[in-house]
Image: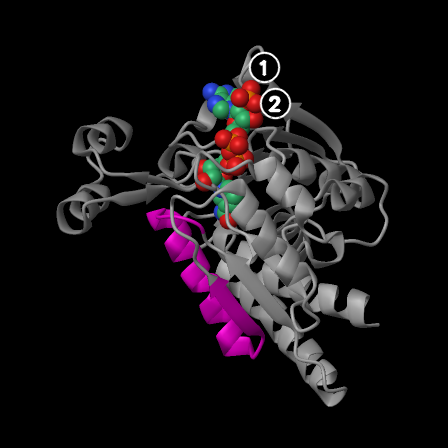
Amino acid sequence: MAIAEGARLLSGNAVRDQILEEVAADLRELAGRGIRPGLAVILAGNHPASEIYVRNKVKTCETLGISSEKITPPESVTTGQILELVDSLNGRDDIDGILVQLPLPPQVDARRVLLEVNPAKDVDGLHPVNIGNLVTQRPGLVPCTPAGIIELLKRNQVPIKGARAAVIGRSDMVGKPVAMLLLHEHATVTICHSRTRDLPAVAREADILVAAMGKPAFVTAEFVKPGATVIDVGINKLTDRAEVERLFPGNAKRLADIDTKGSTLVGDVHPDSVLAVAGALTPVPGGVGPLTIAMLMVNTVRAARLRRG
Ligand code: NAP
């Protein structure tokens, strides 16, 4: 792999460890006041990736001493049943955070469910009240992955103020909130999407490039300004050997992954190509992913503080 002079991998694991130490200190302080924050996770149906995400979230809660509860309605669950579940969690004093793991089964009205979560317990930061708080810079709960990206940049001393930033992807969960947070940090932000004309040229303007599109290894060197910091949010599991051979010709490790584990994990950025021009890149796995969980813990503690005073 050709690596540009000075190119570095921005590990999310190191930043996650720092953040979790801070959360642990907060939890000790709360414990001194008799408060143990509680997180409830609703995992509806059978979604293998969601099951892994939720397992990791619950495990992190256990390690830190946050009480956690996993509720697993079946794939056939109705919107009404999930709304009832959310209502009962809204009413419980021992629950500070409610996380509805997405995607929900197709028959469930996800927007209605997210609206039902008490904004004070909305640790995913997806309720319109929290989005409004984010946009107007009021205290509230900020979506975890975008918040984690800002922590990663700041704790690696990547200058944001005055920088040109481009975000590829405009989802409610990642693209839009990360663009807003970068704006609040005084970056000049361009939001790109599937209709953006000449995407590589727009992306190449950026000192900070965030790829959040769900397209394996899509962002290559031609999207990257020399020396730019590239944040790879994508998590794509490739299982097709021919696709892996096409995207990563001659990459023995990728092919070995497919042959031994049946899959290989790829971001939205092509690391071999981008590391040759970027100043810094987050790896997949081990980049943005660990921070999403860390920021969920931060939000759970914040929710407990905001609600319990
Ligand atoms: P999403 O809701 O599917 O949104 C994808 C966005 O990418 C859309 O705005 C879409 O544009 C844009 N896009 C798709 N193809 C494009 C193209 N060819 N050119 C330009 N833009 C294109 O996805 P998401 O929820 O934001 O997630 C994005 C990725 O991040 C996924 O791989 C997901 O698994 C990953 N993710 C990772 C974490 C983590 O913790 N690391 C957390 C959340 C998500 P349009 O709006 O025009 O369709």
Disc 2 beta carbon < 8 A from ligand 1?
yes
In contact (CB < 8 Å): disc 1 and disc 2: yes
Is 155 drawn above or below residue 29 in the view shown? above
Quadrant (top left, top right, bottom left, bottom right) of the C terminus: bottom right
Residue at 72%, 53% (x, y): give it.
118
Q: Is residue 126 visible?
A: no
Residue at 36%, 37% (x, y): give it.
272
Residue at 59%, 66% (x, y): give it.
39
Left/right placement of residue 21 relative to residue 69 reads right
- How far across and down, in percent of the image, does residue 75 sit? 38, 45
Q: Secondary structure at mark 2?
A: strand
Left/right placement of residue 44 relative to residue 180 reads left
Residue assigned mark 2: 192
Q: Nearer the viewer, residue 56 or 249?
A: 56
Disc 1 beta carbon < 8 A from ligand 1?
yes
Query: What amino acid is found at the position of numbered circle 1 in the picture?
Result: Thr
User: Which range of residues does the magenta coloring cover?
Assistant: 44-70
Residue at 70%, 44% (x, y): give it.
127
Residue assigned mark 1: 196
